[in-house]
Image (cartoon, grey):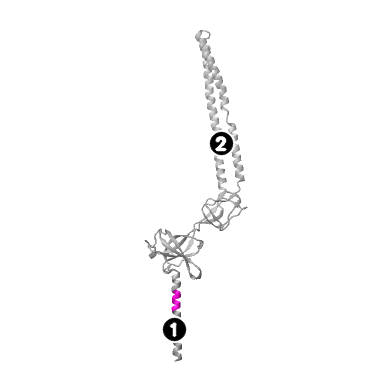
Amino acid sequence: MRKCIYKYYNTRHLLLSILLLGIATCFQNCSNGNHEPDAYGNFEAVEIIVSSEGSGRIMSLNLEEGSILNEDRQVGYIDTMQLYLKKVQLQAAIKALHKKVPNASAQLDVLKEQLHTAQQEQSRFEKLVHSGAATTKQLDDIKAQVEVINRQLISMQSTLEVQTDGILAEAEPLRAQIMQVNDMISKSIIRNPTKGTVLTKFAHAGEFAAPGKPLYKVADIENIILRAYFSGEQISDVKINQAVKVFIDAPKGKYKEYEGIVTWIASKAEFSPKVIQTKDERVNLVYAVKISVKNDGGMKIGMPGEVQLTPME
């Protein structure tokens, strides 16, 4: 009799344990939102390596890894003293050329005065010839003198214009060099090209920079991308601008859910990356899909993520 009672209570205890375990499992599944991923992947971002465009010592580079930078923000500059001195030299050379430009007005004024005097003399002799007080030969001589002075005036005017144009033409290459120096000075100012977070700092103030030398790496991690992989059977259910659910691991075996938007789908399949386990492990060819997700700081570059497709409207 005692054995039967003992067996009854043991069986009842076992059934109660199974029931409680089932309730706990159900509660956990519900708390995870019936999480059944359709694809797996890793988070990435568009990383930009900002390189030096100038040459010289880095005088300032005000940023640290983790710094959040706005677009076009000045973060430092490279020594521009030699460029400034070169610019001053070119400007002085242009001023010196301008001083070589002939004073055309002063030189032409002399001949214009001579021409004016000769023309007055010609008018006087015309009156004298008309009254018979002078000969035609004298009038002809005066006319010839007026013609000579007039030709000299035209010739000198042309010569001075050629000289002036030649000198000013020599200044044009110098102006172009000044524009080049100004561009190099502008490029010596280090400006952040895009809004983002500094991932890696490659250089520091005091180091020498040359064109192409990497200074730092920046990426926009506020709008992070999950590169997930779908099988050929799944890819027909994926569309551009489709809303999907993205999950990352959370404490105590749970998941954190985000809303994502499909922004890109690969045009051809590729072999499954070794780090990715797709829904069907027998699948060899998969399609890469980029999903844009608003990051609240919980997602990091390289972190794994999971995707669950939502019904399309």
- Considering depth in this image, is 283 or 222 the residue closer to the camera? 222
* 136 in magenta: no
Q: Main secondary structure of the magenta part?
A: helix
Q: Residue furthest bottom?
A: 1
Q: Quadrant of residue 282?
A: bottom left
Label annotation for residue 12? 1
- Does residue 275 show up? no
Tell me the CA gap for discs 2 and 1. Answer: 105 Å
| Residue under numbered circle 2 | 171
Q: Residue furthest left?
A: 313
- Name the spot of residue 82 as percent of width and height, x first: 61, 45
- Considering depth in this image, is 298 or 153 the residue closer to the camera? 298
Q: Are marks 2 and 1 in contact (CB under 8 Å)?
A: no
Instruction: Judge the density around disc 2: few (<14), some (14-19), many (≥20) Cα neighbours within 10 Å.
Output: many
Q: Earlier in the sequence, mark 2 or mark 1?
A: 1
- Does residue 175 show up? yes
